[in-house]
Image (cartoon, rainbow, N blue to C red):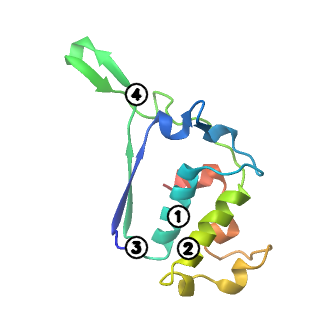
C-alpha cells in the first residue's frame, strides 16, 4: 500500500441501499459486505503503520433549502444517516480481509501467523485477527 491517508466517504447509502444491500441486517453467518470489509482493511493497515491517517467524510442527505438558496446537505448524525449497526462479528468478512492481508508479501511478515491459524485468538492481537463487530468497525473509522 502506498497511500498515506485514506479518505472514507460515508453517507446514508453507504450502509443501506436497498435492494442491493443493508449493513443493518448483517449476521454472524452473512456472506459479507464490501463496505465493512474495506473499512476493516483500512483499520488494519492503519494499525500496522502502512497508512498514517484515516479521514472520514460524513455526507448528510441532500435537501432543498430556499433560505440557503438551493440544495444543501444535512448534518449526517442528526439526519439519521447512520443506522443502528449490528454488534456481530461476521466471520466471512474477517476471513476475506485476512486472506487479502496474507496475500500481500509486504504485509504477511507483519501478521502474527501462528495466531491467524488459531480459532481462539488471545487478547492483545491486532483487532481484525481477534474479530471486530460491524458496529466496532464503523465506530473506529
Q: Badge 4, how many Cα within 10 Å: few under 14, some, many 20+? A: some
**Closest to the observer, 17 or 89:** 17
**Labels 2 and 1 touching (C-beta < 8 A):** yes
**Distance (Cα) linking label 2 and label 1:** 8 Å
CA–CA distance in space, label 3 to label 1: 11 Å
Q: Nearer the viewer, residue 106 or 42?
A: 106
**SS for dot 4:** loop
Does residue 37 sit above or below 58 in this rendering? below
Q: In the image, which disc is placed on residue 1?
A: 3
Q: Which residue is mark 1?
A: 41
Q: Which comes sooner in the sequence, label 1 or label 4? A: 1
Q: Residue at x 39, y 70 (%)?
A: 51
Residue at image mark 4: 61
Give the x, y percent position of residue 80. Answer: 51, 29
- Between discs 4 and 3, the one toward the N terminus: 3
| Residue highlighted by disc 2 | 101
Horizontal relation, residue 108 to residue 25: left or right:
left
Residue 85, percent from left and from top: 63, 42
Report if residue 47 is visible in the image.
Answer: yes
User: Within 10 Å of the Cα at label 2, are there few (<14), some (14-19), or many (20+) other Cα atoms?
Assistant: some
C-alpha separation, residue under disc 1 versus residue under disc 4 = 27 Å
* Relative to 33, residue 124 above or below: below
Amino acid at each position: 500500500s502506498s497511500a498515506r491517508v485514506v479518505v472514507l466517504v460515508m453517507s446514508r447509502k453507504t450502509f443501506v441501499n436497498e435492494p442491493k444491500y443493508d449493513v443493518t441486517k448483517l449476521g454472524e453467518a452473512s456472506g459479507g459486505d464490501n463496505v465493512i470489509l474495506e473499512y476493516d482493511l483500512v483499520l488494519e493497515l492503519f494499525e500496522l503503520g502502512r497508512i498514517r491517517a484515516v479521514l472520514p467524510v460524513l455526507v448528510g442527505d441532500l435537501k432543498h433549502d430556499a433560505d440557503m438558496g438551493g440544495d444543501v446537505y444535512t448534518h449526517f448524525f442528526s439526519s439519521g444517516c447512520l443506522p443502528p449497526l449490528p454488534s456481530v462479528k461476521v466471520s466471512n468478512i474477517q476471513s476475506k480481509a485476512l486472506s487479502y492481508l496474507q496475500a500481500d508479501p509486504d504485509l504477511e511478515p507483519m501478521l502474527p501467523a501462528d495466531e491467524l491459524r488459531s480459532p481462539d485468538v488471545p487478547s492483545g492481537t491486532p483487532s481484525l485477527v481477534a474479530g471486530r463487530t460491524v458496529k466496532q468497525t464503523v465506530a473506529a473509522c
